[in-house]
Image (cartoon, grey):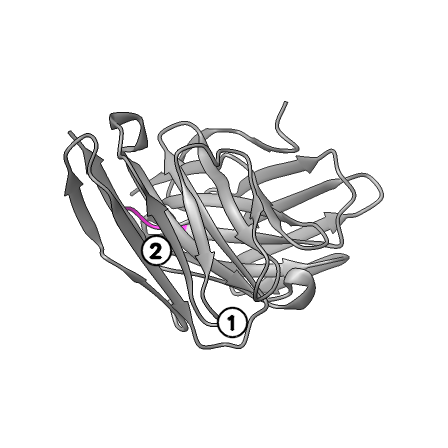
Amino acid sequence: NAGVTQTPKFQVLKTGQSMTLQCAQDMNHNSMYWYRQDPGMGLRLIYYSASEGTTDKGEVPNGYNVSRLNKREFSLRLESAAPSQTSVYFCASSSQAGTEAFFGQGTRLTVV
Amino acid sequence: KNEVEQSPQNLTAQEGEFITINCSYSVGISALHWLQQHPGGGIVSLFMLSSGKKKHGRLIATINIQEKHSSLHITASHPRDSAVYICAAILTDKLIFGTGTRLQVFP
């Protein structure tokens, strides 16, 4: 997916460990998002940022924190990972009014 | 209740069949994306539409903003169309996703 770079692609954590998922876009988009995707649940919004310097909670924010470091970068942090956070995480960005939307390749996270 | 509902959740078809996936939403939106996700792959936007109909190859998407409904049609389906199709409603400052429709097309 052109323009949105998400790292890492895979990660295994032990319960209680912390980690940060990185996301960067080079399309000058204002809005950026973090979603998690679980079987049968679809994509659920964790946090989003409508512009540099602002962040808002989505549907499932508990256990996560985010930082909109600048217009390009939006990171997701798990301070103390739990098995319930085992999921596939997607970062996305969109243009004003959402006319363009691009997604990262996803991060498959397993918490044991 | 999800703000964006998709049906069916799962769909199987024989190669060549005409496919319809539906998306309805309960919130006011400005437009909607249809997305495609292949197994193990990323997510790409197929269409963004705010009114009427758009066509790209064998894919056709329609939307009726007043009725809060959109459909994605695939004509002459092919096994390579097998994927998860997701509609995403565009609100003022965020996207809200449906739960997706898993399509399998058999030869």
In the image, residue A60 lies at what x, y percent? 49, 33
In the image, residue B103 lies at what x, y percent? 41, 39
Residue wearing tag 1: A71
Amino acid, disc 1: Lys
Q: Give the chain of mark 1.
A: A
Q: Is residue B41 visible?
A: no
**Which residue is the extreme one toward the right?**
B66
Foreground residue among B73 and B18? B73
The residue sitting at 63% across, 38% down in the picture is: B23
- In the structure shown, which secondary structural element does the residue marked by tag 1 occupy? loop
Task: Specify the quadrant that holds the N terminus of chain B.
Answer: top right
The residue sitting at 60% across, 54% down in the picture is: B33
When asked about the image quadrant of residue A9, the answer is: bottom left
Q: Nearer the viewer, mark 1 or mark 2?
A: 1
Amino acid, disc 2: Gly
Q: Main secondary structure of the magenta part?
A: loop
Q: CA distance from mark 1 to mark 2?
A: 23 Å
In the image, residue B82 lies at what x, y percent? 35, 45
Q: Residue A54 shows which numbered tag?
A: none
Q: Are marks 1 and 2 on the same chain?
A: no
When asked about the image quadrant of residue B26, the answer is: top right
Is A68 a magenta residue? no
From what the image shows, is residue A40 above or below residue B104?
Answer: above
Foreground residue among A77 and A12? A77
Task: Specify the quadrant that holds the C terminus of chain B.
Answer: top left
Magenta residues (range)? B37-41
Q: Is residue A83 left or right of residue A1?
A: left
